[in-house]
Amino acid sequence: MIHRVVKKLISKHVHVSRLNKMNVKLAVQVLSQSVGSALGYLTALNHLPSSANNTADFCIKIDDLFDSLNSRVLLNRIKPLLSAACSSSKHLEEWRIS
């Protein structure tokens, strides 16, 4: 029996056809918190090389960026970057280039 770490990902997320090349939904699903966490987990178990941590960090950073640009409510206590941007929110820190 095979156990999948990221159950929502299927082959079309990795093997992109011409029709799916510009599918933003697939990109958002791949560059997500859950994929970043899974890569970090598999790296910690030595199933992936330590360099996969860089990809994990990238996925989480892009997920945060998507959230910060896609806010729909004034206040979201679970994921603050889904809240509206204001001078006291984490958005400016997230958008700062380091």
Image (spheres, grey):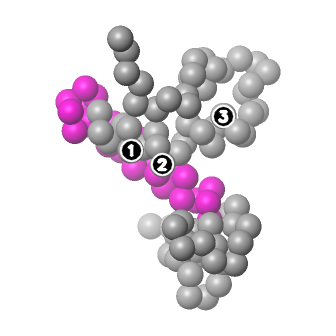
As drawn, which residue projects farthest toward the top? Answer: 1
Q: Specify whether 76 is left or right of 54.
A: right
Mark 1 and mark 2 residues within 8 Å of each other at the beta carbon: yes
Quarter holding residue 8: top right
Type of amino acid at the residue the image marks with label 3: Leu
Q: Earlier in the sequence, mark 2 or mark 3?
A: 3
Could you say whether the residue bearing mark 1 is in a helix, strand or loop?
helix
Q: Which residues are magenta?
A: 43-68
Magenta span: chief secondary structure? helix
Identify the residue under disc 1: 37
Q: CA distance from mark 2 to mark 3?
A: 14 Å
As drawn, which residue projects farthest toward the bottom? Answer: 87
Q: Residue at x 55, y 28 (%)?
A: 9
Q: CA distance from mark 1 to mark 2?
A: 6 Å
Identify the residue under disc 3: 26
- Residue 62: within the magenta? yes
Q: Position of residue 80 (x, y in %)?
A: 54, 71
Could you say whether the residue bearing mark 2 is in a helix, strand or loop?
helix
Quarter holding residue 5: top left
Identify the residue under disc 2: 33
Q: Specify whether 82 is left or right of 61.
A: right
Could you say whether the residue bearing mark 3 is in a helix, strand or loop?
helix
Q: Residue at x 71, y 72 (%)?
A: 73
- In the rendered image, the vertical position of residue 96 relative to residue 9, given as above or below: below
Which numbered circle lies on residue 55? none
Type of amino acid at the residue the image marks with label 1: Ser
- In the rendered image, the vertical position of residue 78 relative to residue 26, given as above or below: below
Callout 1 environment at 10 Å: few (<14), some (14 to 19), or many (20+)?
some
Quarter holding residue 95: bottom right
